[in-house]
Image: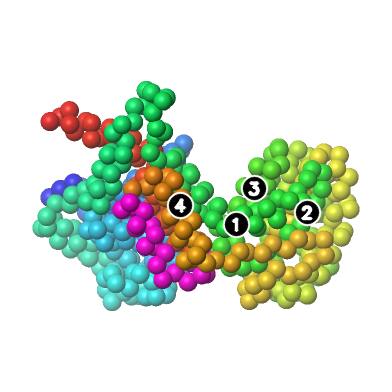
Amino acid sequence: MAIHATKDIKIFYSYAQEDKALRKRLDIHLATLRQQGLTSWYDHEILPGRERAEEIERELQAAHIILLLISADFLASFQCYIVEMQHALQRHKAGKARVIPIILRPANWQDTSLKRLQPLPEKAKPVVTWAIEDEAFVDIANGIKRVIDDMAKREPLNDNPDKKTTSTAFANQAQHFDPLSRATTPPITPAKLDFRRKLVTEYDLDSVMAAFKEPLDYGEAFSFVIAGDERVLREYVIVRMVQEFEKEIKGECFTTPPIDLNQQDLSCYPLQSLLEEKIKRRFNYTNARELAIKRPLQHVILTVWNYDLPLLTVQEAISAFWKSFVPTISRHLSRKKLCFVLILAHLPPENQPCLMEDAMSLQLPDFDVQRGLRPWLSRNLHTMNVPDQARDYCLNQLQDLHPNPVQIFRRMEHIASYLQGEYNEDRFREVKVRNKRRSLQR
């Protein structure tokens, strides 16, 4: 993958959707470089029907320059901060790509691993704080051009040696595998979805999911309360609860957009009818009962996020809703054999689920990285026949990790994404085909 001029350079944009307009402005200022042959890619170029994660992974792997468009939304985005940025930094550290942070809006990026990189524009002044934003974009474009010129002077970029080593390890393990024979050993690597399921959604959530699934039955309404960090609940626990519910209950499921409860709501609605009024406003129904009965062949999951209401207040609001709502829909649920599930997600500063009548409290598990997570991860990587070098890399990601659910899940997602990109069956087949083609050309 030699770099001789601008025409050989591929740029990847990693950005939050909230910064789409600024990304577009930057791309316009790179027009002169594109006229010289530079190519750029961002996620809106994914064609319908293509798998999003796989496309992003492929383009990240092919990019010479990765632009991280930094803002508070970028740092809060799981896809940007955990998946794309961590992959980009790996390639940067291996010398296979250049990562350039572009400071679009003020954000606390200095406390992240980006602090070791030289950002753009000049003096890391956020683009939106410049008196004339176009001047900031010109400064950024000039900085990117300097990077391209520097890359062209250096040695050509070769394939990642670590990747070569692990690919060779795979090839050595698979040389006795005959795809035409059913009597031989199975393929070396599992499907890519196994990585994400085993390494992210399965670890130590079994007790929570078991408590969630135990009472579920057809024709009834159920309510659950769970507390913890918003990212963990949004990205893992509640997503997993919905998945488990859909597996447990047959039929179509309507997962509603979440409803937020805030202090300011109390100035707009009476406490006793707070949740029903929020439902009516969100879904444009006459009353909350229609949420269930207007979907005659669907189960319903309603997620409610309490951001800053005191415990006693939210208890009263939810209990009042439940006592008036459930009797009105019970006959409908029983007759149609459907379920209505309400999940109350209670955020800090209250880290324990609030006790609520007729609601089951779900407790996040405690984590012990050294005694629990590392041995568990090591066993699973061994079971999946991940090469030793890659296994050591994954286990090293857990070094000096505090037993914080947020950090643990972030790190596990990074590991899963790394494995998904490098060692899934599809990529393994591509490596074998490419190696075979090269040998024939010789």
Q: Identify residue for label 2.
A: 222
Which residue occupies the foreground of this view, 131 or 395?
Answer: 395
- Measure the C-alpha gap from mark 4 to mark 3: 24 Å
Q: Indicate which disc, 2 or 4, sits on the residue closer to the N terminus.
A: 2
Residue type of the residue flagged with mark 1: Leu
Please identify the quadrant where the C terminus is shown. Answer: top left
Q: Indicate which disc, 4 or 3, sits on the residue closer to the N terminus.
A: 3
Q: In terms of image quadrants, where is residue 356?
A: bottom right
Residue type of the residue flagged with mark 3: Glu
Residue 88, numbered label: none
| Residue 328 shows in the view | yes
Q: What's drawn in magenta, residue-wise? A: 388-407
Q: Identify residue for label 1.
A: 205
Residue 6 inside the magenta-drawn segment: no
| Residue 279 shows in the view | no
Of badges 3 and 1, the one in the foreground is 1
